[in-house]
Amino acid sequence: MASSFTPFPRPGYSELYQERLSRSLPFNILRTRQVTGESADIQHREFRAGAAGQNGIKAALFYTEGLVENQAIDQFVLQPIMMQMKSLDTETGHAADIMTLLEDYYIPASGVQRVENMGRVIELLNSGSAILYLDGVDTALAVDLTGWKERAIEEPSSQGVIRGPKAGFTESIKTNLSLVRRRINDASLRYDGQKIGEITKTSIVVAYINGIVNEDVLAELKRRLSLIQTDSILESGYVEEFIQETSWSPFPTLYSSERPDVVAAQLLEGRVAVFVDGTPFVLVAPALFGEFFHSPEDYYNRADISSLLRLLRFVSFLIALLGPSIYIAITTFHQEMLPTDLLFSLASQREGVPFPALLEAYLMEITFEIIREAGIRMPRAIGQAVSIVGTLVIGQAAVDAGIVSAAMVIVVSITAISSFVIPAYNLSISVRILRFLFMLLAATFGLFGVSTGLILLALHLCHMSSFGVPYMAPFAPFQLNEQKDTLIRMPQWLLNKRPRLLSRNTWRQPPPDKNPAPRK
């Protein structure tokens, strides 16, 4: 069940949605300024609508500077009202009728709606809408004029590929939805929107393909989203922690991506995506263990090349997880497993090292983790250079000073490099955490401890699930028919079925005997 907590209480704010607008324009202006605290970015202008010779109808326009385009305000609101309404007899016309004319005829904007309470006025005002008040009318017009600055569509920074689309999601949820809609040109693609966060009121959109999605997964995801009670949602990581399967496992149960092609492919398999406004990372559920080793480029290269690279990632995962622990176990408890020449070489290297193998490995691993984190946090222009130079200098200096052996530096370096091969950054972090536990088991019980740790890890992974789908599927429970896209990737013309546990409609394309693709 999703976690939840009571939001920070704000007395009186919920009552704003029960507070109806007044017919008095001065009162509405004063009340809006009071609720917004006369914030510097909340601008308003008072004017009259109607012919110059007449008294006209008093009006006021509120908008948030930076969230709307000033040119759009002039073009779609002020100019139609002040110029085109000159011929309108406002002295005999009823104010409510004038408001209807504005809504139906004079304001040429696509998003126009009536607002009746102050809470909704503030919500739309902070979302990029302009609020128009008329004297004598107890409702307001909200005109959607959203026009804040957006980052250009660029290549994703966390999931780069050599071959494939270079477009990535941005911080605008509207742009992200359009990028996926462009790739799935079908009426069955559904977007269900809602707002979460008592203060931020962040837009959340659940995306799925009707007729393909697993209805149970979709219902469970929406249920968990409905249970979220918090003040703020500033990034998709907030939502992930609320709806993830468990908070006490290092392994992620939700997949995150900033690539539109990846999210589109996941939707086509029957998954559900969660878009969060303000972040380029989109959550996808359910997430399976084996899919964290898949790269978008696997489906853009030939099957044989993709299969070899995917196997390399699984091997790198084992090296990143067990490399230092196996070295510690063999050099501490099982020296007989080493060739004699190699054993003498390692013994001579460790002759002047004052620390045991475990402390030596911990010292090097922590040092490399510090260097890695420093390279990420430092400015991009010098971060990579500092990481490389720092690693070389510190490693060589540690060997020359006799603090660690050269073999340990090699093992830790290969382990660190192997962790970068894993495409999913959140899974590589899990490996880095578990690596320290396996090193402790190896130093305590040798290879027996490493084997015990692997058994417990396998039991933990088989016990996990993601929105009701077994986390280790299709390995456990083993499904032979769904091994075409797991450890290796079969050619596209053989991938003719969607994963059975993920989608309701299993056929991805016509059966092989009706597929015109060559089969050689």
Image (cartoon, rainbow, N blue to C red):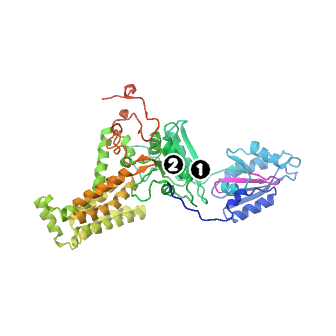
Residue located at (61% from left, 59% from top): 198
In this picture, which residue range is highlighted in magenta?
A: 126-140
* Crowd band around label 2 with a 10 angstrom C-alpha radius: few (<14), some (14–19), many (20+): many
The tag on residue 221 is: 2
91, above or below 27, in the image:
above
Name the quadrant of the C terminus. top left
The answer to whether any part of residue 17 appears in the image is yes
Q: Position of residue 8 (x, y in %)?
A: 60, 65
39, above or below 150, in the image:
below
Q: Is residue 226 left or right of residue 358?
A: right
Q: Amino acid at mark 2?
A: Leu
Mark 1 or mark 2: whose residue is earlier in sequence: 1
Q: Amino acid at mark 1?
A: Gln
Callout 2 secondary element: helix
Q: Position of residue 27 (x, y in %)?
A: 79, 61
Callout 1 secondary element: strand
Q: Residue furthest left?
A: 340
Residue 506: image quadrant is top left
172, above or below 434, in the image:
above
Instruction: Determine if the magenta segment contains residue 391.
Output: no
Which residue bears the numbered disc 1?
194
Q: Nearer the viewer, residue 222 or 388?
A: 222
* Crowd band around label 1 with a 10 angstrom C-alpha radius: few (<14), some (14–19), many (20+): few
Q: Is residue 215 left or right of residue 60?
A: left
Q: Nearer the viewer, residue 113 or 359?
A: 359
The answer to whether any part of residue 393 appears in the image is no
Residue located at (78% from left, 45% from top): 100
Q: Position of residue 278 (x, y in %)?
A: 54, 55
